[in-house]
Image (tube, rainbow, N blue to C red):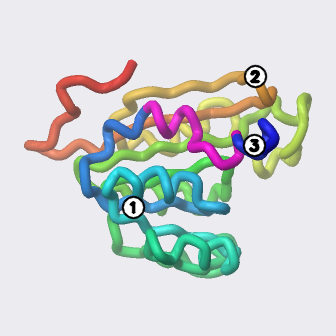
Amino acid sequence: MSEALHAALEPSPWVQRWSPLVAAGASVLDVACGSGRHVRWFAARGCRVTAVDRDAAALAALSDIAETVVADIESGPWPFAGRRFGAVIVTNYLWRPLLPAIVAAVDEGGVLIFETFARGNETVGRPSNPDFLLRPGELLAAAAPLRIVAYEDGCLALPERFVQRIAAIREHPGVHLPARYPL
């Protein structure tokens, strides 16, 4: 297997790093899940995963480990109105009109783990369309209703890309961060 293909199947290091914030057995929503690398990651940890994507074929391969929802979340209604999850995962995806709904889908005591491309990426590759690149501080502002645990905005290597990424929790009285979490 090529190194690039293997990397595409592995969970994001950012998601792996902040996964300990997700409670055992939590409900997890993977937004625009693609091939399901994070669906598999959380299902293997005993979470109840919901996967949403517009690619029915990709979702069919996940139906034995997750609730799958085929939806074009950019053109149709948000299929999770009124639902909340113990974790919401988003990687390599940006549709600005959904940012408030994504943040609202994080339940009390739940976690948002989000990582996607940022301005500057147009200098090193794709995506290069500013519609799909976060502006400086944009993800931080979108997650403002949550407690920010970690935030990064910059350039990563291998492959070279510009990203913003955040790990944040929705605080709830009586639900606290684990005594230890990765820093």
Left of 32 or right of it: where is 173? left
The numbered dot on residue 105 is 1
Sequence-wise, the earlier of marks 2 and 1 is 1
Left of 175 or right of it: where is 70? right
Mark 2 neighbour class, 10 Å CA radius: few under 14, some 14 to 19, many 20 or more: few
Residue visible at 47% across and 43% down?
Answer: 113
| Residue 141 on the magenta span | no
The three-letter code of the residue at mark 1 reads Ala
Quarter of the image where one finds residue 95: bottom right
Question: In the picture, which quadrant includes the C terminus?
Answer: top left
Looking at the rendering, the stretch of residues picked out in magenta corresponds to 7-17
Image location (x, y in percent) of residue 107: 29, 57
Question: In the picture, which quadrant includes the N terminus?
Answer: top right
The numbered dot on residue 85 is none
The numbered dot on residue 157 is 2
Say which of 49 and 97 sits in front: 49
Sequence-wise, the earlier of marks 1 and 3 is 1
Left of 101 or right of it: where is 118? right
Residue visible at 14% across and 43% down?
Answer: 175
The three-letter code of the residue at mark 3 reads Leu
Spatial CA distance of label 2 from label 3 is 17 Å
Q: Which residue is mark 3?
A: 133
Which is closer to the viewer, label 2 or label 1? 2
